[in-house]
Image (cartoon, rainbow, N blue to C red):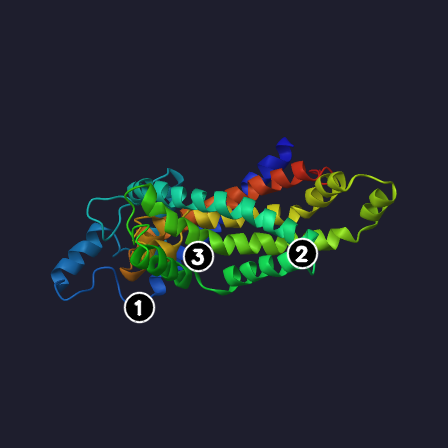
Amino acid sequence: MLKYVMKRLFISLVTVWVLATIVFFLIRILPGDPFSGDKITPQIKESMMKYFELDKPLPIQYAKYMTNLAQGDMGYSLRYKNRTVNQVIADAFPKSAELGIRSLFLAIPIGIFLGIFSALNHNKLWDYVCMIIAVIGVSVPSFIIGGLFQYIFAVKLRIFPVAEWKGFDYTVLPSLALSLGTLALVARLMRASMLEITGQDYIMTAEAKGLPTRKIIWKHLIRNAILPVVTVLGPIVAALVTGTFVIEQIFAIPGLGRHYVMGIQNLDYTLVLGLTIFFGAFVVLMNFLVDIIYGLVDPRIRVGK
């Protein structure tokens, strides 16, 4: 097990390094530079380029950035005055994480329940109702869902605030809007997996032996059908917890997603690079944890040599 963990750790570090290297060079291909503007004179621009050492050759910039990154230093933002990328992440990540966790607590249990309920009532009224909800969640973009929730529950009914992030009431609408897509995905995966497993030989054998229906459902159907859901949990958790660009923009939430959009618009090299590495590292971590959980859920899956 230790050998497996060390191997996965090495692969994870290489993955993050490759990601950082690619983004480091790709972002500098974008047209323009961080210090363009009507109020920026050539002298000021030259001074800023020299201050942030952007006037040096790319290989030297790359070597220095990677050296600092190995020490946990992601550098200073080019746009936020006297703020490091580490400080931006420390300030914004808790808000994105809170929003993502609230959405996960809504999406995962409800999605699994709808998938199970739909599969057990296959081709019946409730199956169609659940699948209509799932199709809406998958098909309708999150910015439309968010805008619709704002119009109905904030503007018309005045139950919740329209935007910002100042208390519990402000978290309800963005959490619901963010959870709907994940809920729909989990429900469809769970339903399809349940229907596929229902026709397996071991399920028919269990029924022929006279096992109670409840025991067949809980011990055999759900336990095996949930594996596809566990597989996608890693990217889903990473995507929701680290911030979503659209929802955070619509509801004016000062999370990582909003900073990422602003960083790209402003060509803030260090901020975009730092957030990308943070996102990538989080996805790698979640996928690693899912691999471990996957083996615990299904006894047939074990770590080999």
Earlier sequence position, callout 3 versus callout 2 = 3
Marker disc for residue 69: none
Q: Amino acid at mark 1?
A: Pro
- CB under 8 Å between callouts 3 and 1? no
Graded by Cα atoms within 10 Å as few (under 14), some (14 to 19) or many (20 or more), the crowding at tag 3 reads: few
The percent position of residue 161, horizontal first and vertical second, equals 29, 51
Query: Which of the 4 image quadrants contains residue 146?
Result: bottom left
Residue carrying label 2: 192
Image coordinates of residue 217 in percent, x first then y, are 72, 43
Provide residue 155's location: percent of width, then percent of height.
30, 58
The CA span between labels 2 and 1 is 45 Å
Which quadrant is home to the N terminus?
Answer: top right
Q: Give how far across and how far down residue 17 sits, in percent.
A: 46, 48
In this rendering, the answer to whether 26 lies above or below 229 is: below
- Residue 73: which quarter of the image? top left
From the viewer's perspective, is residue 35 above or below residue 283?
below
Residue visible at 23% across and 53% down? 79
**Toward the viewer: 43 or 184?**
184
Q: Is residue 135 above or below residue 277?
A: below
Front-lying residue, 236 or 280: 236
Q: Residue at 32% of width from left, 47% of height from top?
A: 170
Q: Amino acid at mark 3?
A: Ile
Pointer 1 residue: 31
Q: Amino acid at mark 2?
A: Ala
Determine whether label 3 and label 2 are within 8 Å by CB: no
Label 1 packing within 10 angstroms: few (<14), some (14-19), many (20+): few
Answer few, some or many: residues within 10 Å of disc 2's Cα (few below 14, many 20 plus, some between 14 and 19).
some
Q: Which residue is mark 3?
A: 22
Taking depth in this image into account, of 175 and 83 the one nearest to the observer is 175
Nearest to viewer (mark 2 / mark 1): 2
Indicate left or right for 178 with 189 as reference.
left
CA distance for labels 3 and 2: 37 Å
